Image (tube, rainbow, N blue to C red):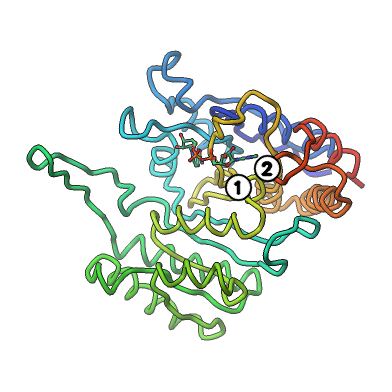
Amino acid sequence: MSEMRKVTLINGDGIGPEVVNATRQVLEAAKCPLEFEYQDAGAEQMNRHGTNLPPSTVESVLRNGVALKGPTATGIGVGPQSANVALRKQLELYASVRPVKSIPGVKTRYDNIDLVVVRENTEDLYAGIEHIVVPGVVESLKIITEKASTRICRYAFEHARAQKRKKVSAVHKANIMKLSDGLFLDCFRKVAREYSDIQSEDVIVDNLCMQLVKNPEKYDVLVMENLYGDIVSDLCAGLVGGLGLVPGANIGTSSAVFEAVHGTAPDIAGKGLANPTALLLSAVMMLQWLKEDVAAARIEKAVLKVYAEGKVRTGDLGGSARMKDFTQAVIAHLA
Ligand code: NAI
């Protein structure tokens, strides 16, 4: 058996503690060689720590090199900087990787979706540099650098190569943002020349959204700036059945944080109704990253069997199962 590996576990807000607990139960039932170190982050921690991202949490992720995280809430128009944005910046988790794949048994408009959204995670409008110029006029700065753009494009091509994928598409709006998105596109084109084995193309973000809805099978790996990545990820999640299903990884040079694409789902929080699949599949990505491929495959297969059987479905997919029923079904299917 592999050596025990310590993983930072962050509950987060809303449905976070519920889906983290469900995922932990499955990881334990699968006897994964993991030891968990609970740390706090999120809006609910403000009173206790005076911050939504205590330094001890960042230190823990740095120490362990890996974390599994529930979603954290961020106020709209008010409150401190998002704990997510801060975590991604402080740990330089520059690549957000979100595989979006049809799940057999989950009926949607398409049954052949298999693409990966690679999102730059550290800059763009998420730099959060905003100020009031004069009352009634606000300026928000979009920061795009050659360094970060080159790094994310290279990551996308390396990922494509490692996963034996055929094409990388750069998503941009360089027709309007000629300097910022123009720089991103230039970096993409330069990097693409180093990967003659992989096709490359670029597509304007609004056209991409229409194409994804009409012909999603045209795409393979999509690489883009932070804000487009945020929006396109949710669109892609809709193509395969919703936010309850899509996992994600935030990869840096010295650590990685695995979390679902979805947020805290305040409308269903605390009711035991959330679908834990997205975090479970994020844990599968984490196990693959830790080179625990056997454990990763066991859990992924168990999740897929539950969907293929079609007996246990949570409310987001039109079923009436509670989260604990789904979790138990996955555990029962662990081979
Ligand atoms: P959301 O993803 O929380 O919810 C959107 C819709 O999807 C809701 O109807 C919700 O019930 C449903 N949903 C999401 N996850 C689900 C699951 N696992 N099972 C079943 N249904 C699910 O997005 P929203 O409402 O825009 O954001 C709520 C909060 O989450 C905000 O404070 C936002 O900042 C935060 N957020 C945090 C993220 C993170 O920590 N990585 C990512 C996205 C949003």
Question: Does the residue tagged 1 have its C-beta within 8 Å of any atom of ligand 1?
Answer: yes
Position of 159 relative to 134 (above/below): below
Amino acid tagged 2: Asp
The image shows residue 335 at horizontal and vertical percentages of 92, 47
- Residue 26: image quadrant is top right
Specify the label residue 316 is tagged with. Answer: 2
Picture layout, residue 187 above or below residue 89: below
* Quadrant location, ligand no. 1: top right
Q: Nearer the viewer, residue 42 or 112?
A: 112
- For the residues carrying marks 1 and 2, which lies nearer the camera in this image? 2
Calculate the distance from the C-alpha at mark 1 to the C-alpha at mark 2: 9 Å
Q: As drawn, which residue projects farthest toward the bottom? A: 196
Q: In the image, 302: left or right of 278? A: right
**Which badge, 1 or 2, comes first in the chain's sequence?**
1
Q: On the rendered structure, is 247 left or right of 328?
A: left
Secondary structure of the residue carrying numbered label 2: helix
Residue at 47 percent of width and 28 percent of height:
42
> Badge 1 local density, few (<14 within 10 Å), some, or many (20+)?
many
Residue closer to the observer: 153 or 317: 317
**Residue occupied by mark 1:** 243
Residue at 84% x, 50% y: name it: 298
Secondary structure beneath dot 1 equals loop
Q: Label 1 amino acid?
A: Leu
* Outermost residue toward the left in this view: 134
Q: From the top left corner, tell me how far across and down residue 230 is, in percent.
A: 45, 53
What residue is drawn where x is 79% and y is 30%? 324
Which residue: 40% across, 55% down? 226
Q: Are marks 1 and 2 in contact (CB under 8 Å)?
A: yes
Q: Is mark 2 within 8 Å of ligand 1?
A: yes
Counting from the top left corner in percent of width and height, residue 268 is at 61, 30
**How many C-alpha atoms fall within 10 Å of the one at disc 2: few (<14), some, or many (≥20)?**
some
**Which quadrant, please, contains the N terminus?**
top right
